[in-house]
Amino acid sequence: MKTIKSFGELKELLRPFKCSDPGQRTIGFVPTMGFLHQGHLELVEQSKKETDLTVVSIFVNPTQFAPGEDFDAYPRDLDRDAELLKERGVDVLFFPTMDDMYPEGYATYVEVAELGKVLCGKSRPTHFKGVTTIVLKLLNIVEPTHAYFGRKDAQQAVIIKKMVTDLNVGVTIRTIPIQRDPDGLALSSRNIYLSTEERAAALVLPRSLELLRKKIREGMLDVDELRQLFRREVDNVSLVEIDYIELVDLESLGEITVVDPDKTLVAAAVRVGKTRLIDNFILGEI
Ligand code: AMP
């Protein structure tokens, strides 16, 4: 595995790969913020299965954190991450510097209008603008044929797909299912913030979503009724506060009143102590 910091070095390394046999060789790209877990590694696995060369980036992107959020505290362990990626047979680890990504005077941002204002965008109004900006920058630098994202961040995946379509970026976006711990909690680099009590309490999030999935399967399709059911479940657990529970159209992320079993996103965010956790399930395909 080659570990690379500079754009120039990366371009140089990938150039022969891109030039020989054009159209035949594929580059898979997995953007991450590091502190890797099995969710990230499944993205790597998928990329390795589907492409000829896998590039993983690690960059904790400041523009997707609002002032007062956990940018400084966000866990980082580059050595451990590099070891894990090497073991998985990753070809290139790209970890750009802050100064290269956002040099003095940096001024350009990309925003996918309405899609970034709902769900997580309500409590994190600048978050998705930061995400789309960094992802587009990275796609322009790496120029992959395929890029891999987790459905854990379903809204992010929908937004990135829309950006890539709207801006004619020549990359195929692929998504993988949510990876969970055996007790059901979705893997997240932020789970490390949770105390033992908080972690136990946090299980109400996947449990309540699973209950909604079951109820939908049994024919409960009224959105208000489902949201109330989720709220009742979570309100029973101390330490956990609901940020939102929403059932929306999978493509437009717009409000719905009745579940469409073929294209609905059921997404929730909660706060457990100081930690904000998200989870979801999808009816349909993204
Ligand atoms: P992050 O490092 O949190 O920015 O995440 C990098 C990528 O990993 C994103 O595409 C996430 O959606 C994906 N990811 C994070 N956690 C999970 C998970 N539990 N299951 C699947 N994908 C995940």
Image (cartoon, grey):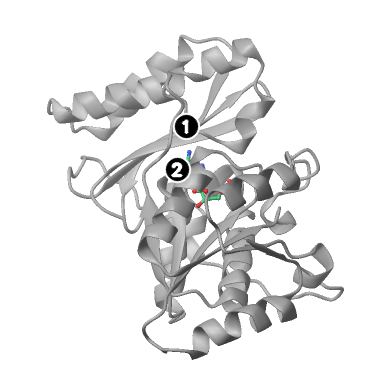
Q: Is mark 2 within 8 Å of ligand 1?
A: yes
Residue 135 sits above or below residue 24 on the image: above
Q: Which of 35 and 231 is in front in this view?
A: 35
Answer with left or right where residue 225 lies relative to residue 82. Answer: left
Q: Label 2 neighbourhood size at 10 Å, few (<14), some (14-19), many (20+)?
A: many
List x then y, in percent, for residue 155.
Answer: 44, 51
List x then y, in percent, for residue 74.
Answer: 73, 40
Separation of disc 1 and disc 2 at Cα? 7 Å
Q: Quadrant of the C terminus?
A: bottom left
Q: Quadrant of residue 162?
A: bottom left
Q: Quadrant of the N terminus?
A: bottom right
List x then y, in percent, for residue 198.
Answer: 60, 15
Q: Is mark 2 on a helix, strand or loop?
A: helix
Residue 223 sits above or below residue 15 on the image: above
Which residue is the site of mark 1? Answer: 186
Disc on the earlier residue, 1 or 2? 2
Residue 137 sits above or below residue 155 on the image: below
What residue is rendered at 51% in x and 90% in y?
19
Q: Is mark 1 on a helix, strand or loop?
A: loop
Answer with left or right where residue 117 lies relative to residue 62. Answer: left
Amino acid on which disc 1 is placed: Ala
What residue is rendered at 59% in x and 59% in y?
131
* Marks 1 and 2 in Cβ contact (< 8 Å): yes
Q: Does the residue labelled 1 lie within 8 Å of ligand 1?
A: yes
Can residue 119 be seen here? The reply is: no
Answer with left or right where residue 211 lies relative to residue 258. Answer: right
Which residue is the site of mark 2? Answer: 152
Can residue 100 be seen here? The reply is: yes
List x then y, in percent, for residue 207.
Answer: 37, 20
Q: Quadrant of residue 123?
A: top right
What residue is rendered at 67% in x and 83% in y?
12
